[in-house]
Image (cartoon, rainbow, N blue to C red):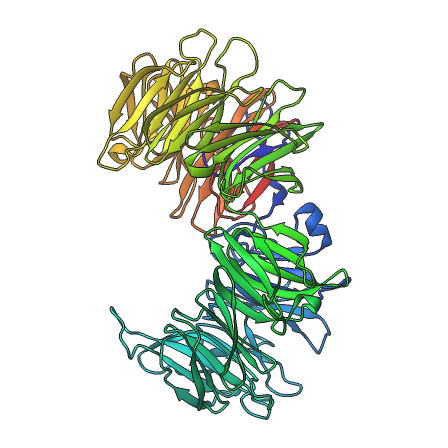
Amino acid sequence: MRTGAALVVLAASALPAGRADAAAALTDVGVYEGFGEGSAVAMAPLGGTGDQVVLGGRGLAVLDDNSLKTHKPRWSYHWGDFPVRGQGGDNQWITAVEPLRDPATGRTDQITSTSENELIRFDGRTGRIVWRRADAFLYTFGDRLSLVSQGAGKPPAIVGEYGTTAYSSADGSPLWTATVPEGDFAPGWVTAAQLTRGANPGVVFGAESDCGPGGGPDCTGHLFAYSGDGKRLWEVKPGGQTTSMVADDVTGDGLAETVAGDNQGHVSAYSPTGELLWRVQAGEGSVGAVAVQGGRVYAAADDNVVAFDAAGKRLWSQPMEGQVTKLEPADLGKGGKLLAAVAVASRVGRFVAVDPDRDGDRRTWQSTVYGRVNDFTVGTWHGRRVAIAGANDAVVHAVWADSGEPAFDYLGHSWVTGVDSGRVGQADAIAHTDDQGHVVLSDERGTELWRRWLGGDDEADAEDVVFADVGRSEPAIVAGGAGTQESGVVRAYDGRGAELWTGRAEGRIVQLITARLTASGPKAIVAAVQRGGSSGVAAFDARTGATLWEHMIGSAGATLAAADVDGDGLDEIAYSSKPYPPDTPGTFALLSPSGDVRWKQENFEIRDWLTVSGGAVIFGSRSETGSVAAVSAADGAPRWRTRLGSKVGFGTLVPQRSGVAASTDAGEVALLDAATGRISFRTRIVSEAATAGPLTLLPQGGGDPVIAVSESGGRNRTKVHVLSLDGRVLATSPRFQQGHGIDVAPTGGGAGVAVGAGLSVYSYRYR
């Protein structure tokens, strides 16, 4: 039964029958690591030959050649992992990375800011934290931190967007703080700038006004500048609200002019002392990006890149066939001198090179990126210039800078949506899906064996995965998800990732199970299907993917379970959908192996999971402050209801006790008798404000199984607990991560657990 966005695989030695081993423990086996959005990227020489890629997403990773083979970073960090090595998924972002070559050691370090107001300096070779500050307000989403020179022999200062404090790169200590003009927000644009000739060159800030509802013509904010040692230099009020800003040498005198675009389509240039040099119209809409290179100013406006000379004279306009969100000067060899990020659609962008000196179409190459490009950089890979984009679809997209031809892609992995485990060849393997449409097979140590895109460009989400018998010598990995125009796709792959068949449904597939629907052949693939505000059930032939039947029966938010409830050797399908819209009833039903409705109820009860046992359909309910209830599988008549006082989000059968184990938002695990609802035990597994999440049975050879359950304590903390069937806690995992569900399947050596923790999949061994 699918119980959440996770997966579990275990290899474990068995406990003796009837007792718990006092030395039992959950130990690490491996991790398949994800980082989510490519929010910030950089390249730096961190050892070895050439540059390595630094990826900032929902974590920080350094990628090298081996990372492209194993999908494991050279080193990584997630700030929720304070007691252990950095691993795991989270819901916060690394918002900027900046390489810094330490003149004392000659080593390249990384300085990183996060969305949780942290500023951290890492040893670039090892990932060791040199220092960290937890109170640094530097939210530099998709941009760079700026390093401000403090003079010869002195470590530079660090400034960043939405921050007004300069910090020492040596130890993170605050050096000085700028004062934001009265009535303005914290600055949205901050950059180091050579404003004076000397040891303290300067910093330019762009602040937004706190205009309140409706704004107004005077809602413009300020541009203001400080010297590198914290002395205020100048302040101006531009003609429009600043939407982009850069400081660089436009006139060629060695000092930096400040160039700003605004929400009225203007581009303005200011001298190093703050005087307005010129103001021109670049377009009708907001100026999304500006850049300076070789005495020219470039602006992104109205889906064009517009060039101006040092005096503000318009030189040319290049159509870009989409909104330009970022511009950056770059040495691309024959590829040009300017990089642009172009948003084409919600999930498709372009990475474009522009040669400003070319006639006609100045685009020298463009490369499609599946996702919006957040940041890009240029470096060296195997002795050749390479341009790298980080995108919000968890992609690092690298192309050769001179031609735009693909160099490599690294998929940082997005939210885990479904997991299962099985045997591939002679080895245990873990399959998972994510919400960007990927199907991944890895070994239990987290090394990626293969990755596939579930569908075409528009088939964005992969929702669930199962190992299934498809009539071949070994099981197949079957995944399902969303297809084009509200259709669904279900696809089977062999152990090497070759596609076996594809099935289609009239709606996105949100859950997969297997069920015996015919007397011969393998079990069918059965899916919960959602189309708009409706949902239903579809069945597919496991050998070919052909649709056996499809029945739309209720509202959205469906869940399924399958079991033989009438003793004829074939499985019935229990189905429930949530009330949608909330003021309309949901559906609760039992379907025959041929898809016919045996019985159906319409009510407002919200059932989060179903299971079938002893002629009853058992479910967890949010109704009446949280309960577990059972109805007759024959006609849906109520049998029993046990109130637990909190949402009962997950449950699983415990055949050895003729019962069902359930977990609650109050952090409890309960075992109930499936026939009567009587509580056998009720154990609170958490001591703080946390919930008990998905749970499953882990078989123990020769003895009773144990219950594995996740504890979720928020974005940064999750444990996995193992309980005996009398409710004693036997072991707890050593890691603290964000967990989004747990599912389990026995593997060759015994029982093990792999947990989908947000963006990553972890495997543990119980012994």
- Residue 331, image x, y percentages: 67, 71
Q: Is residue 729 visible?
A: yes
Residue farthest toward the front in the current orientation of the protein: 360
Q: How many marks?
A: 0
User: What is the quadrant of residue 626 in the picture?
Assistant: top left
Identify the residue at image location x=48%, y=47%: 738
Q: Nearer the viewer, residue 67 or 639?
A: 67
Q: Is residue 392 above or below residue 241?
A: above
Q: Is residue 335 left or right of residue 619?
A: right
Q: Nearer the viewer, residue 356 or 524?
A: 356
Q: Is residue 455 left or right of residue 529?
A: right
User: What is the quadrant of residue 359 in the picture?
Assistant: bottom right
Q: Nearer the viewer, residue 76 or 553?
A: 553
**Quarter of the image where the C terminus is located:** top right
Q: Nearer the viewer, residue 334 or 578?
A: 334
Q: Is residue 24 visible?
A: no
Residue farthest toward the top in the current orientation of the protein: 568
Residue farthest toward the left in the current orientation of the protein: 583
- Residue 756, image x, y percentages: 52, 41
- Residue 588, image x, y percentages: 31, 24
- Residue 51, image x, y percentages: 71, 63
Q: Is residue 373 above or below residue 182?
A: above
User: What is the quadrant of residue 430 in the picture?
Assistant: top right
Q: Is residue 359 above or below residue 675?
A: below
